[in-house]
Amino acid sequence: MRSIPIKLSFAEEVKTFVNVANRYPYDMDLRAGRHVVDAKSILGIFSLDLSQPITLEVYADECEDLVNDLQQFVIK
């Protein structure tokens, strides 16, 4: 499993994030505090507090392709 801190601020960013995430076969969740939602669910993501950083949890060890495509959302 790999955990990646990300930031989604606007509705357009959420839409782009979900479109990219759905291109990959990995199981992934978004965690904000104690709330966890499917990272491929646009409605689930909008139920989170997007004013805070979110953790993307990818249930795969080799997911560099996904991380590269989501680089614009990764908090450095």
Image: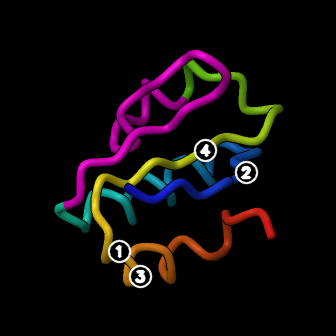
> 10 Å neighbourhood of mark 3: few (<14), some, or many (≥20)?
few
Residue 64 quadrant:
bottom left
**Relative to 13, residue 55 above or below:** above
**Residue appearing at x 55%, y 32% in the figure:** 31
Residue 12 % position (x, y): 62, 51
Residue under label 4: 55
Residue 38 quadrant:
top left
Left or right: 35, with 63 as reference point: right
**For the magenta stretch, what is the residue range?**
26-45
Residue 4 % position (x, y): 59, 58
Mark 3 and mark 2 in contact (Cβ < 8 Å)?
Answer: no
Residue under label 1: 63
Left or right: 33, with 17 as reference point: right
> 10 Å neighbourhood of mark 2: few (<14), some, or many (≥20)?
some
Question: Closer to the N terminus: mark 3 or mark 4?
Answer: 4
**Residue appearing at x 54%, y 17% in the figure:** 35
Residue under label 3: 64
The disc labelled 3 sits on which kind of residue?
A: Glu
**What is the C-alpha distance between the residues marked 2 and 3?**
18 Å
Tally the numbered discs. Answer: 4
In what quadrant of the picture does the C terminus appear?
A: bottom right
Left or right: 7, with 24 as reference point: right
Name the residue nearer the viewer: 70 or 1.
1
Secondary structure under tag 4 reads: strand
Question: Closer to the N terminus: mark 4 or mark 2?
Answer: 2
Q: How is the image coloured?
A: rainbow
> 10 Å neighbourhood of mark 4: few (<14), some, or many (≥20)?
many
Question: Closer to the N terminus: mark 2 or mark 3?
Answer: 2
Secondary structure under tag 2 reads: loop
Q: Can residue 31 be found in the magenta stretch?
A: yes
Residue under label 2: 7
**What is the C-alpha distance between the residues marked 4 and 1?**
15 Å
